[in-house]
Amino acid sequence: MINYLTVFLAQTQPVTTPAERYLLVYMIMVLIIITALVVVFFVVFQKRKNKLLLDRIKQQQAFEKEIAMAQTESQEQTLKNIGWELHDNVGQLLAFASMQLSILKTQFTDSDIKDKFKDTSDALKESLKEVRSLSKTLNNEVVLNIGFEKSINNELNRLKKMKFTSAELVIKGDKVDFENRKHEIIIFRILQEFLSNSVKYSEAKNLKIVLEYQPKRITIIASDDGKGFDMNTVEKGSGLINMKSRAALINATLDLYSKPNEGVTLTLNYPTS
């Protein structure tokens, strides 16, 4: 027992010789270096891990964006085909029907019958104009050719003839051209979706679109004065999902606001720089 105590006391005695002090300093330095290497390795490992995760997220986002863009282009091609079909086939049929009706009208002398023919003929001519106007808005090449502002104005005029008391476009600021013309089409389709929903659901009498050009962005506010809806209870349909997904494709922000009996307002902010 005494021997063990003697050894323990000997081991716990302060370091006195230079060799022992040197050995102690050496061991401490080795421990510090090892600890520092472990910390550096851990930090580098975490950074590489985070970078890999970030790259994977970016790749996934890029992949999803490419798919969404491909879907959008496919939809545009479908709309273009429908536009051609309306203009070439349906338009020609309506024009032929109008011409045949005019020929048939000449075979009657009764003024009442002629008036009825005239009303029908006028309705056919208006239908023909409507079909041709609609076919233009469905064709992205026509939209790009006549320009963004005029396309919106044409769409509002078409809807005004259909059922609205007023449908106006207000332009503020100095015009800024789109660097990417595809973005112009995407924004126009978002507005078409909003206007289509107003026609189907809002029971509105008036439509308004404010197009404001600012130094670094374009702000578009579209609104109707219809019955509106409760945003907390309404089911998000494909229309709203389509609008938001289209806006995300061009890095734009889209907000929709509504209250019962207070209409619907869409606000879209598109960065130009």
Image (cartoon, grey):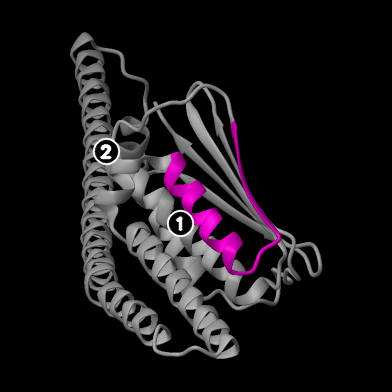
Location of the C terminus by quadrant is top left
Region rendered in magenta: 149-171
Which residue is depicted at the point 70% across and 77% down?
233
Give the Cα distance between marks 2 and 1.
40 Å
Within 10 Å of disc 1 (Cα), the crowding (few <14, some 14-19, many 20+) is many
**Position of residue 110 measured from the top left corner of the image (x, y, whole percent):** 55, 90
With 196 as the anchor, is 180 left or right in this view?
left
Quarter holding residue 129: bottom left
Q: Nearer the viewer, residue 195 or 102?
A: 102
**Position of residue 260 measured from the top left corner of the image (x, y, whole percent):** 79, 70
**Position of residue 145 measured from the top left corner of the image (x, y, whole percent):** 28, 42
Mark on residue 190?
A: 1
Identified by mark 1, the residue type is Ile
The answer to whether residue 14 is above or below residue 229 is above
Q: Nearer the viewer, residue 19 or 197?
A: 197
**Position of residue 4 measured from the top left corner of the image (x, y, whole percent):** 32, 46
| Residue 189 visible | yes
Within 10 Å of disc 2 (Cα), the crowding (few <14, some 14-19, many 20+) is few
Identified by mark 2, the residue type is Lys
| Residue 4 visible | no
The answer to whether residue 270 is above or below residue 61 is above
Mark on residue 47?
A: 2
With 39 as the anchor, is 131 left or right in this view?
right
Q: Main secondary structure of the magenta part?
A: helix
Which residue is depicted at the point 50% across and 21% down?
215
Q: Nearer the viewer, residue 151 or 122?
A: 122
The answer to whether residue 117 is above or below residue 164 is below
Q: Nearer the viewer, residue 8 or 46?
A: 46
With 162 as the anchor, is 164 left or right in this view?
right
